[in-house]
Image: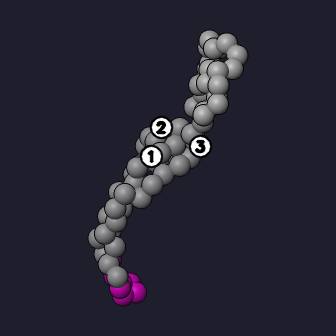
């Protein structure tokens, strides 16, 4: 191995490393949204929100994630 801007030191090490899923189970990012700026009480409005699952768990209708 080489210490930056100095000299060689020690032997190279060869070892196996196990990489684990370090994502949080529940993590999401809002990709886009279309929500009216103003809404009157008692009225219905179309709203669209696109969300990306960035977490380690899979979203499913059975678990109540999608409707």
Measuring from the top left, give residue 35's x and y in whole percent: 34, 73
- Towards the viewer: 57 or 21: 21
Name the N-terminal-most of marks 1 and 2.
1
Q: Residues within 10 Å of mark 1 (few under 14, many from 20)?
A: some
Measuring from the top left, give residue 56's x and y in whole percent: 53, 38
**Image quadrant where residue 22 sits:** top right
Measuring from the top left, give residue 63's x and y in whole percent: 51, 42
For the residues labelled 1 and 3, the Cα–Cα distance comes to 11 Å
Res. 62 visible in picture: no
Q: Does dot 1 land on a helix, a strand or a loop?
A: strand
For the residues labelled 1 and 2, the Cα–Cα distance comes to 8 Å
Q: Which stretch appears magenta?
A: 38-44
Q: Which mark is residue 24?
A: 3
Determine which residue is flagged by label 2.
Answer: 58
- Towards the viewer: 16 or 18: 16
Which residue is drawn at the image coordinates 34% and 65% (left, top)? 33
Name the N-terminal-most of marks 2 and 3.
3
């Amino acid at each position: 191995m080489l210490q930056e801007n100095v000299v060689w030191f020690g032997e190279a090490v060869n070892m196996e490393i196990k990489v684990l899923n370090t994502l949080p189970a529940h993590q999401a990012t809002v990709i886009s949204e279309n929500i009216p700026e103003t809404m009157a009480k008692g009225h219905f409005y179309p709203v669209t929100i696109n969300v990306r699952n960035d977490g380690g768990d899979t979203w499913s209708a059975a678990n109540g994630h999608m409707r």
